[in-house]
Image (tube, rainbow, N blue to C red):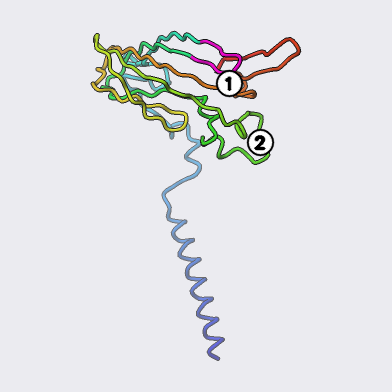
Amino acid sequence: MKHVISSVSILFVITFFAQAVFAQDSISIYNKTNLFDPTFLQQDGTEFRSANGAPGSKYWQNSVNYSIHTTLDEKDTTLKGAVAINYTNNSPDKLNYLWLQLDQNLFNPNSRGAAITPVSGDRFDVQGYTKGGYHIESATIIYKGKSYKIDPVITDTRMQLRLPFSLMPNGDKVDIKVNYNFSIPQYGADRMGRLYTKNGVVYQLAQ
């Protein structure tokens, strides 16, 4: 008899819980069909971007000009370079640091990209390539005639340059110089690699 009562009690609890869930769902104010209403996702325009997505009267983009000088060491399959960057802060905000992308760090054996590569490998030369990744020799900031040596903060494929000053909004400029080198992977990210032929080695150096 006790077993029958317990079973009835459990059934009652399950039924009550199901009804409660159904009741809660039935009183929800969310209507899934609202998403298809053309007025549902309206976005008011701002001075930075119009409602139709076009640039507004105060739309801005930060701008960069750069020059890269490199040398290729064919014996070591290494590229050594120096990049000079002129950066303009057109935003309405002060900037206390800048970010640079280090795509070659994908080929560092300790990179996140290497960590998620299947054991069977992929079309990139990530696994088994122990010399991959950037070696940042130096980073220098020139601002208003003064030069500052910067210790970059590198996390995987991102490099942060923390400024010893604030780069002011609305057109302030700074110059960045970075010296670096990296070993060229044989199969690198579609636009980077080495092809060995009977006439010598063909290098593709675009990324």
> Looking at the picture, how far across and down is residue 21, in whole percent?
47, 62
Image point 35% across, 13% down: which residue?
87
Q: Is residue 12 above or below residue 142?
A: below
Residue, disc 2: 121
Image point 44% across, 12% down: which residue?
82
Q: Is residue 6 above or below residue 142?
A: below
User: Given the current orientation, which residue lies at the most extreme front position?
Assistant: 75
Q: Nearer the viewer, residue 8 or 23?
A: 8
21 relative to 200 in the view: left or right: left
Magenta stretch, overall SS: strand
| Quadrant assignment for the N terminus | bottom right
Q: Which residues are magenta?
A: 71-80
> Looking at the picture, how far across and down is residue 18, in whole percent?
50, 66
Dot label at residue 184 = 1
Image point 56% across, 12% down: which residue?
72
> Looking at the picture, how far across and down is residue 78, in whole percent?
55, 18
- Which amino acid type is shown beneath numbered disc 1? Ile
